[in-house]
Image (cartoon, coloured by chain):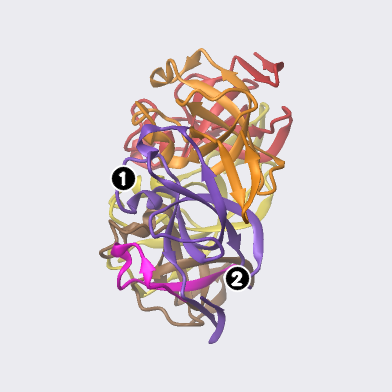
Chain colours: A purple, B orange, C red, D brown, E yellow
Amino acid sequence: MQVAKVRGTVVSTQKEPTLQGVKFLLVQLVDQGGNLLSDYEVAADTVGAGVDEWVLISRGSGARHVINSEKRPIDAAVIAIIDTITVDGERLYVK
Amino acid sequence: MQVAKVRGTVVSTQKEPTLQGVKFLLVQLVDQGGNLLSDYEVAADTVGAGVDEWVLISRGSGARHVINSEKRPIDAAVIAIIDTITVDGERLYVK
Amino acid sequence: MQVAKVRGTVVSTQKEPTLQGVKFLLVQLVDQGGNLLSDYEVAADTVGAGVDEWVLISRGSGARHVINSEKRPIDAAVIAIIDTITVDGERLYVK
Amino acid sequence: MQVAKVRGTVVSTQKEPTLQGVKFLLVQLVDQGGNLLSDYEVAADTVGAGVDEWVLISRGSGARHVINSEKRPIDAAVIAIIDTITVDGERLYVK
Amino acid sequence: MQVAKVRGTVVSTQKEPTLQGVKFLLVQLVDQGGNLLSDYEVAADTVGAGVDEWVLISRGSGARHVINSEKRPIDAAVIAIIDTITVDGERLYVK
């Protein structure tokens, strides 16, 4: 999984029928020093993440193992809102 | 998922039998600032996207979860036409 | 999918038993301007592509959805020989 | 698989229900000369790896083949703690 | 698939139970001109490849289609030992 920061939302009305009701968040990836990378992902959200929160994203087929998503054509999902990240015994991030 | 802009089409007559009738769009990836990247994808389209529209693409096995595509040898699909993208409370894109 | 140009072949006798009879093509990826990239792929071919032809390749689990390949340990396949690529209304490639 | 060094942990309380009890390690990838890369992964751990140990990580759907993880939305897992790495007959790493 | 050269081995005793008896090779990727890249992969080997041999590796779920590996948490496998690579009618590699 990768660490990412929620930056915004993507809205669509004309889409695959199975995507009705799915919330798409634009999340920006974070490097291991805690800095924002230029890479982003548009991820389905089922855990209720909000803008500026740090989250874990899962990509590929793993994203379809979140609730009610087995049949959805998604390749990225928010799977957790991060509380703390600890590296070498030091806190890198606290919510 | 990634944000991409529809740029054109790819046509083939000699292909896997299960690909008959599938429309292939050439889409160019967009970075999180809204600029075109050099990366592209040839994606199957089932939502009816047109040239210059911004779309969401799903890659990997997720692409085969669009309608009637479970058995097709595809690894990318257009899953939604984007209406709006909002980043940090500002509109980055409006259709 | 990505656009690639067929450059050559890879031959092996000592291999997984399920790969008997599979033809492996060395294909070089093409960027969206039609130029050869340094990236290549060794792809299973079931559509009969020849050297110098431009093809569509599918990677990952999608590659195993070509004919008779469900049980083969492959991660890339040629799925179509390209006739034309059109970008912004202009022909980028004609076979 | 890739070689990685365990650097820390990621903790989350608000997450997908299937992730209860899963330990998430932050691991940093190691290049083939034994140096730390800037790339990291947050990987589920079921083998009991500790900080500073070198491990093998599996990414993608393979990560869900570790014990009790078939239904979890994960895309990376620690699958082994490394004892030795030998390259060209020389020991690159000994635990 | 990618072309790689076998460089060494990775040994582990504390690992997922399904990995007992699996041989892990450290293989270094080869570019299309035949030069070694800095990228490597730790790949399960079932075809009996030895150090310095050139092999084809399959990554992702394809790796689990080698013999007896369906349930193993691996994401890369050696699937063939290469005899010859021919590019533009010239031999790039002969075993």
Per the rendered image, the range of residues in magenta is: D10-30
**For the residue marked with disc 1, what is the amino acid?**
Glu
Q: Secondary structure at mark 2?
A: loop
Where residue D77 appears, x then y in whole percent?
40, 65
Where residue D35 appears, x then y in whole percent?
64, 72
Closer to the camera in the image, B59 or D17 = D17
Where is the C terminus of chain E found, in terms of image quarters?
A: top right
Closer to the camera in the image, C65 or A17 = A17
The subunit letter for the residue under badge 2 reads: A
Q: E8 above or below A64? A: below
Q: Residues within 10 Å of mark 2 (few under 14, many from 20)?
A: many
Q: D37 above or below D53? A: above
Closer to the camera in the image, E38 or D40 = D40
Whole-number angstrom distance, CA of label 1 to CA of label 2: 31 Å
Residue at x 38% of width, y 21% of height: B18
Q: C14 above or below D83? A: above
Q: Residue furthest left?
A: D68
Q: Which residue is mark 2?
A: A32
Where residue C4 appears, x then y in whole percent?
62, 29
Q: Residues within 10 Å of mark 1 (few under 14, many from 20)?
A: some
Dots 1 and 2 on the same chain? yes
Q: How many marks?
A: 2
Closer to the eye: label 1 or 2: 1
* Apparent side of residue B29 relative to residue A17 in the rendered image (left or right): right
Q: D60 above or below B59? A: below
The subunit letter for the residue under badge 1 reads: A
Where residue E73 appears, x then y in whole percent?
35, 59
For the question of whether residue A1 can be seen, the reply is no
Q: Which residue is mark 1?
A: A70
